[in-house]
Image (cartoon, rainbow, N blue to C red):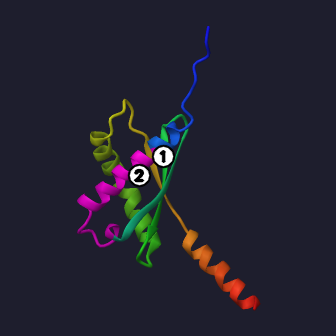
Amino acid sequence: MRKKTTDSNRNDRIASKVQTIVAEILRDEYADDPVLSGVSLVGSVAHGGLQFVRLFFYCRTNDIDAAKRRLDIETKTIRFMMGQKLDQKYVPQIQFIYDDTLERAAKIDELLNNLK
């Protein structure tokens, strides 16, 4: 009997697909929302047997906490809309996490500039 091979890129493909769909939902459905219109999705990771997807976001406004609270409130609605567009048997749970990569990079640049 031959062992079933798994597609190692499946997690990445599902995470990317969920990120694209959620970004479209935020763009189309929440364009008039002053808090969520400044949110951009910058990455995604699927885990837990594709039951969970973490979506990393960046906020163009200074009020990151307000954006996180608003995303947490709208998660159920966004997931429902995502389920209508996603062609899978199960709709994964989504979690929004703030990505502070740009701030950390700016701090590193500042530290390196101060060394000179």
Residue 93 percent location from the top left of the image:
44, 43
Residue at point 41%, 51% (across, down) = 19
How many numbered discs sit on the rendered protein? Answer: 2
The residue wearing badge 1 is 53
Task: Find out whether the residues at labels 1 and 2 contact each other: C-beta distance under 8 Å.
Answer: yes
Q: Is 33 a magenta residue? A: yes
Q: Residue at x 30, y 50 (%)?
A: 77
Which residue lies under the disc numbered 2?
19
The residue depicted at 41 percent of the width and 57 percent of the height is 72
Q: Nearer the viewer, mark 1 or mark 2?
A: 2
**Which residue sits furthest top?**
1
Cα–Cα span, label 1 and label 2 = 9 Å
Q: Position of residue 81 (x, y in %)?
A: 28, 46
* Relative height, residue 112 to residue 16 (above, below): below
Q: Is residue 99 left or right of residue 61?
A: right
- Magenta residues? 15-37
